[in-house]
Image: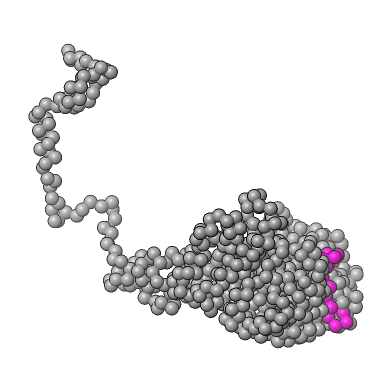
């Protein structure tokens, strides 16, 4: 019979059977037999057997990894190396590697310093591409300066400008906007002037940094577009005038007439003004001081009523005003654009205007892209070509014809075939028509109404795009007119609501549109849920537009 161990007694393997609270101190001693204890110690002192030279070490089915050498030494093998084990990227000249690094976002470009010693100095000498969004910018500096706290907090932007050797390639600075937390603690109407002054001072300190010498692209918002009052554009921004090629000025006041007359941007090709206050004379002087200007975008500008364009180099003009209650900023609103002399102008894009816009074209012999024309009551576009006045899409008289325009985009409230046919007669060489409608109030019946017109009207349309197509009879009759009468039609695209897009809807529309009786043998018809005009209609920055084709389909 096995002997019963008492509580707390240890077995030969040292396991405690049980320990009462009053366990004696000697119970902590090792009671292992001496022979067993000596055997264990001998086993520990005995060295492990050596691996024979003919035996391969144990691996998990993979060949042993080679020890890499530091990048920059001879004979190194890198993950991106070619079959011969040569690092071809690091072998490129410093100038070319610097150009590659300058195309990266600022954080990714700075991280290239940790790749190896070969790359450590490249970012500091590469052309600087600094986007301040995501960093502590003039907004944060303005708030902390006004609160008199954390005045010694280092700015990431200031550190970059201090360490970088230049030259500058691109700088993007966002405007100040009072954070929500600060707005609840501070009285906005009292601190706004102080914040604007502090933000302008911080921005001015950045712009004078030697790392930005030779800057080519400047996107500078002094304040947000809803901030009042708008601060002046820092004087230090004008020091880049000899080298700037692309400039965006936003949330600021342009210089007065005397200063504007002395400004000269010999290499500036793209100019964008967003939420800017200026006078008519100052803006004329600014445009006249850009002899190489090709693209001009005006997004929400006030301080004058009329802008006259006299430029021998402008090829692209886009104007837009989406800011409501503009009279809170200025009583003078931009209402009229006059193309007085623009021999190279090819694309004229008037977008949405809160108070409507009148566009008068006196001389633009190369104009071939026009839109959007709107008929939204007070927001409608008034187009004047010589003696012909087009209000919305209604022409008072078609005494003249503009044969240079080949691309037309319209954004109408009610889809009307009669108005579109008037545009086709006024622009007889039209090849591409883009239509966005919000309501289908008319039936657009045309078989009897336009029977005589079809015998004399030469429809040269090659591309037709219908936005927000729902398949109503008004839209069906409108589209069927071009299906059965456009003899050189090549492509017709229907942008359908996603909730309606299915095989049954497509089959029904093919029957209603009589696609089997198409007038053009080569015509192709596309139904898609994408959009082509919505992105253009909501464009806020010149960089968002495709300058080659402003109405390029993004689907």
Q: Quadrant of residue 277?
A: bottom right
Of 15 and 511, nearer the camera is 15
User: x and y percent of residue 489 in the render?
Assistant: 73, 74
The quadrant of the rendering that contains the C terminus is: bottom right
Residue sitting at x 66%, y 76%: 271
Which stretch is magenta?
374-388
* Percent coordinates x, y for residue 476 in the rendering: 80, 62
The type of colouring in the image is: one colour
Q: Height in image: 246 above or below 508? A: below
Residue 292 painted magenta: no
Left or right: 423 as drawn, with respect to 48: right
Q: Is residue 450 visible?
A: yes
- Quadrant containing the N terminus is top left
- At x 83%, y 60%, the residue is 440
Q: Is residue 422 visible?
A: no
Query: For residue 15, which quarter of the picture?
Result: top left
Whether 384 is among the magenta residues is yes
Query: Would you place residue 531 above or below residue 427 in this image?
Result: above
**Residue extending farthest front:** 148
Residue nearest the observer in this picture, 66 or 234: 234
Q: Quadrant of residue 125?
A: bottom left
Q: Residue at x 40, y 78 (%)?
A: 93
Q: Residue 478 or 309: which is nearer the viewer?
A: 309
Q: Position of residue 272 (x, y in %)?
A: 67, 73
For the point 72% across and 54% down, which residue is it?
500
Residue 158 percent location from the top left of the image = 51, 66
> For this rendering, which residue is in front, 347 or 260?
260
- From this view, report whether residue 323 is shown above or below residue 389: above
The reply, left or right, for residue 156 in relation to residue 49 is right
């Amino acid at each position: 019979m096995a002997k019963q161990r008492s509580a707390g007694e240890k077995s030969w393997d040292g396991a405690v059977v049980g320990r009462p609270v009053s366990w004696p101190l000697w119970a902590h001693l090792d009671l292992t037999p001496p022979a067993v204890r000596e055997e264990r110690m001998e086993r520990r002192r005995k060295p492990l057997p050596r691996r024979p030279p003919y035996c391969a070490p144990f691996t998990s089915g993979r060949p042993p990894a080679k020890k890499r050498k530091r990048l920059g030494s001879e004979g190194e093998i890198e993950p991106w190396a070619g079959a011969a084990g040569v690092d071809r990227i690091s072998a490129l000249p410093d100038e070319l590697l610097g150009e590659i690094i300058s195309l990266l976002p600022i954080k990714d470009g700075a991280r290239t310093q940790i790749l190896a010693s070969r790359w450590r100095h490249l970012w500091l000498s590469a052309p600087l591409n600094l986007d301040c969004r995501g960093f502590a910018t003039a907004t944060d500096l303005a708030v902390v300066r006004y609160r008199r706290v954390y005045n010694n907090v280092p700015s990431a932007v200031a550190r970059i400008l201090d360490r970088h050797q230049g030259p500058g390639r691109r700088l993007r600075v966002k405007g100040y906007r009072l954070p929500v937390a600060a707005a609840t603690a501070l009285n906005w109407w009292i601190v706004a002037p102080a914040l604007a002054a502090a933000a302008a001072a911080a921005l001015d300190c950045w712009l004078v940094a030697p790392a930005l010498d030779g800057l080519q692209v400047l996107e500078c918002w002094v304040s947000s577009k809803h901030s009042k009052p708008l601060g002046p554009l820092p004087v230090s921004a004008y020091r880049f005038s000899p080298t700037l090629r692309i400039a965006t000025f936003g949330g600021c006041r342009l210089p007065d007439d005397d200063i504007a007359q002395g400004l000269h941007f010999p290499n500036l090709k793209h100019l964008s003004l967003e939420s800017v206050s200026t006078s008519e004379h100052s803006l004329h002087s600014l445009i006249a001081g850009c002899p190489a200007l090709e693209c001009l975008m005006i997004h929400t500008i006030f301080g004058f009523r009329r802008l006259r364009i006299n430029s021998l180099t402008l090829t692209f003009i886009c104007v837009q005003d989406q800011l409501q209650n503009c009279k809170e900023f200025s009583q003078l609103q931009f209402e009229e654009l006059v193309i007085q002399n623009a021999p190279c102008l090819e694309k004229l894009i008037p977008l949405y205007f809160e108070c409507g816009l009148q566009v008068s074209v006196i001389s633009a012999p190369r104009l071939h892209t026009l839109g959007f024309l709107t008929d939204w009551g007070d927001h409608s576009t008034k187009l004047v070509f010589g003696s012909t006045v087009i209000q919305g899409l209604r022409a008072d008289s078609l005494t003249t014809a503009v044969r240079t325009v080949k691309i037309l985009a319209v954004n109408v409230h009610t889809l009307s075939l009669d108005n579109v046919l008037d545009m086709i007669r006024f622009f007889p060489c039209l090849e591409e028509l883009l239509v966005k409608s919000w309501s289908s109030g008319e039936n657009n019946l045309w078989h009897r109404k336009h029977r005589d017109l079809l015998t004399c009207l030469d429809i040269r349309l090659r591309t037709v795009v219908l936005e927000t197509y729902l398949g109503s009879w008004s839209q069906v009759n409108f589209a069927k007119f071009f299906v059965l009468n456009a003899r050189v039609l090549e492509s017709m695209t229907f942008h359908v609501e996603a909730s309606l897009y299915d095989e049954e809807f497509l089959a029904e529309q093919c029957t209603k549109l009589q696609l089997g009786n198409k007038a053009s043998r080569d015509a192709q018809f596309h139904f898609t849920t994408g959009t082509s005009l919505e992105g253009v209609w909501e464009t806020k920055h010149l960089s968002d537009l495709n300058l080659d084709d402003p109405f390029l389909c993004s689907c």
